[in-house]
Amino acid sequence: MNKLEMKVCGDLVLREKCEPVENITQEILDDMDEMIKMMQEQSGVGMAAPQVGITKRFLVMMDPDTNVIYRMINPEIISRSDETCVMEEGCLSVLGADGLPVYSNVRRPKTVEVKWTNEKGEHCQSVMTNTLGRIVQHETDHLDGVLFIDYLSGVKREMLMRKVNRRH
């Protein structure tokens, strides 16, 4: 099996809008398993396909409170709460010179409703709030070429980007 490689800030694949998954193939299932391993090795809670150079709409994520793993194919946020909250976010693709993620506070909707297809081809829908809602928003953003740093003010983004080790 191909070993997937983590893409980091500066890699153009992170800015691409991903294509919907038409068929759930064994390759996609294998990639998801590999992404889960990578995510856990790096103490992450989510990883989207473009972070490993795949421009398809799928992601994996873990609820840090229950350790439940979600494998989401073609996830779509269908509603967002008006109520927002600020939480610290980091990203396995936005690393500092020490090779660890850099973090910043980001304001997002507190609750979202998400629909997706799971690895068995079943249609799922769930309301996710707080940390889990935050993770699914962060990861679905990746599928649209959006990084958490895009939500920061110019000054904050500039300060954070000074810490980022661009490997290109």
Image (spheres, rainbow, N blue to C red):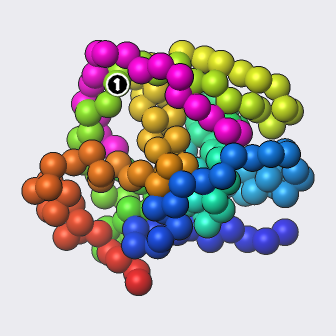
Q: Position of residue 54 (x, y in %)?
A: 66, 62
Q: Is residue 45 visible?
A: no
Please tell me which residue is depicted at 50% across the width and 49% down the height of the picture. Answer: 144
Q: Which residues are magenta?
A: 73-89
Q: Main secondary structure of the magenta part?
A: strand
> Which residue in the protein does label 1 denote?
109
Say whether residue 41 is left or right of residue 95: right
Q: Position of residue 167 (x, y in %)?
A: 40, 81
Q: Secondary structure at mark 1?
A: strand
83 inside magenta stretch: yes
Q: Name the foreground residue: 4 vs 151.
A: 151
Residue type beneath disc 1? Pro
Quarter placement of the C terminus:
bottom left
Q: Is residue 50 above or below residue 83?
A: below
124 inside magenta stretch: no
Please tell me which residue is depicted at 53% across the width and 28% down the height of the picture. Answer: 77
